[in-house]
Amino acid sequence: MQNVHAGYAPARHLHEPLAIIGMDETILKSITREFRVNDLFLFGNSSSQNDIDILIVSNDFSNISRIKRKQLIQKSSPMLDPICLTDEEFNKLNNSDSSLWEKISTTGKRLI
Amino acid sequence: MKDELIKQVRELQNFLIDKVAKAESGANITNQEVRLINEALSSLSFIIQNLNIEPHQKVILQKTYRIALDVAYEKLFYYSAYYYSYQKISKGEIYEQQESFFQINVNTATMISVIEGYNNGTTGIGGSTDDYYAERMPRVLWVLEYVLKNSLEELFIPSLYVTYNLSQSLSLYLESGHKDYSEKAMDLLNSILKIQSRFHSLDSVKRILSENIQLDIFRIFQNWKQECALAKEKTPINFEISNFDTFKSENSLRVLSSLFFLDEAQFTSLFERKYDQVVSEIAKHRVGLNNFLFVKSLANYLFLKGNEPIELDLNHLNKGELDFSKYINDIFKDYQESASIILTDDDLPRLLNYDDDTLREKVAETILGVDKHILNRESQKPHGVSEISDMEIPIRLEDELYYMCMPFKSGREIPSNTVPVGVSYQIFRPFLHFDNCVVVFVSAKRASQNLMNYIKRMQSKLGWNIAVIENEELAKLLKQNGLLN
């Protein structure tokens, strides 16, 4: 077999138990199953299981259009409202003074 | 004129690709450059949606649109121009005020490009940045109220442009059919109409409009768009443009851009009169605004004149040298071995009788090296409007993530003996959204000769990785894996 293998990234340790964050472990697995995730933030109002705001950082997104990134995540996890960034895009965001980054950095929980 | 369009579209595409390359290198993209990108995208959108071009060229233009819009989109900074507008205009010096008006219009133009991208099938609308468009626009209305309340005549012209541009974006949004912001957009558009009425009642504004034909026609055009968006009774349009021959190229092209929608006969006549002058003028300068405005009017004109097929000369935007044929046996179980399978008389009729869902599930069973959860999801998902292909399977080739996009055609779906060339857009479309992409077209019936020739041409000319598993070959693959039952 020539360099073909499943689109699966190894599981990583979480900083907090998922039950406390209110996020189903299967959601996390469904993301890391397809993408090699470098960073993952939960932010906003995570007490509800609907429309969970999540920031996913993966260089696998670099060859995928923005609209498609979101669709791919929502395929297996329709309750997620994801922002999908590459490392470079994420660095630009956390060096910016946008209110979005302020929200993520003050209320967000890092999951990976 | 066709040759001129071909030349100008190539220039436009090259301009956008240059800006993308500049952004990717980390260099700063100025607001002036974003303005030009949006002007170019506006012309490109018309071509994508309306001109008679081949499907693969439509995909290339859509991809160009997508990557260039990303550059403009990055500069929105969550509509900070809207957010800080009141502060800058009510308290700033004249140059800060001018800069703020400029940035507001650039932000609005980017949202117009997003909506046009939605209309031409390239992008979506929605997400936190787009949310700010509607959330922060009221701050711009405060600016307009401030200008009116304080009778700041020196700011009337930029204010008018802002109201018409905002109105254009909202009308376009409401007409697009997208729903998330429709209530807010309706409220905002009604608020802007009231502000516009107040401006238009002022003598100084009436004088400005009477002296500035370009602005006045833009006003009429936006009024017409508002009436369409709000389902109001249309105001009759009746005007003649005088002294058009004395207009400079940019002014005349702006007028023509509005006129195309308002009065086709006048548009055609005036465009023909202006054509030689504009061509001669843009040839003397670097590619810029007038080129993009001209492309739009030229595309408008050719559309009205019968919209004959046109073959553009495009940059193919190719990346990567992957040869997917080397991997196909690693992805589909016993693919090579299946070539020696003997089919019985019952086998093909059985294959042709499968519906789309059954075909997807069976083919998914033959795919190796992909997580079963993903295969189950993709093979069982309902068909959605936003889906590019029936199945989109992530695979890693040479340690990079690729998407294997699989459009399916069951025997039941295709009434003719072979699959017609009309499905080609569905086969090529994945290349718009994925830079790392292979397409595997799965069909129970044989592809027509025209379709196969078109696919081979794109494999050769554009380096697109497209494999076809059809008819007997498909039956043999399934039978080899015990799935043709």
Image (cartoon, coloured by chain):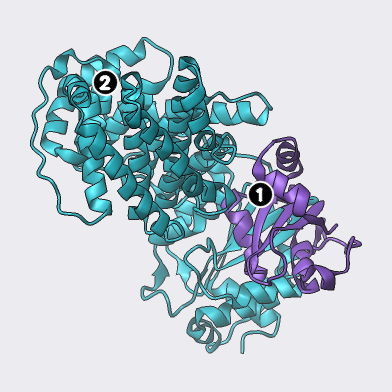
Chain colours: A purple, B cyan
Relative to A20, does residue B294 appear above or below in the rendering? above
Residue A46 makes an appearance in the image: yes
Would residue B315 be found to the left or right of residue B217 on screen? right
Please give the label number shown on residue B281.
none
Q: Nearer the viewer, residue B373 or B324?
A: B373
Residue B167's image quarter? top left
Q: Is residue B61 visible?
A: no
Numbered disc 2: secondary structure: helix
Establish if B422 lies above or below A61.
Answer: below
Residue on which disc 2 sits:
B251
Would residue B194 be found to the left or right of residue A80 on screen? left
- In x, y percent, where is residue B444? 51, 75
Going by the numbered disc 1, the residue's amino acid type is Asn
In this rendering, is residue B16 above or below B470? above
Observer-nearest of B137 and A53 = B137
Query: Looking at the picture, how far across and down is residue B178, in whole percent?
Result: 41, 58
Q: Chain of mark 1?
A: B
Name the residue type under label 2. Answer: Asn
Q: Chain of mark 2?
A: B
Question: How busy is the neighbourhood of tag 2: few (under 14 within 10 Å), some, or many (20 plus)?
Answer: some
> Crowding at label 1, few (<14), some or many (≥20) Cα neighbours within 10 Å?
many
Q: Nearer the viewer, residue B384 or B340?
A: B384
Q: Name the quarter where the N terminus of chain B is drawn.
A: top left
The residue to which callout 1 is attached is: B436
Q: Upstream in the sequence, badge 2 or badge 1? A: 2
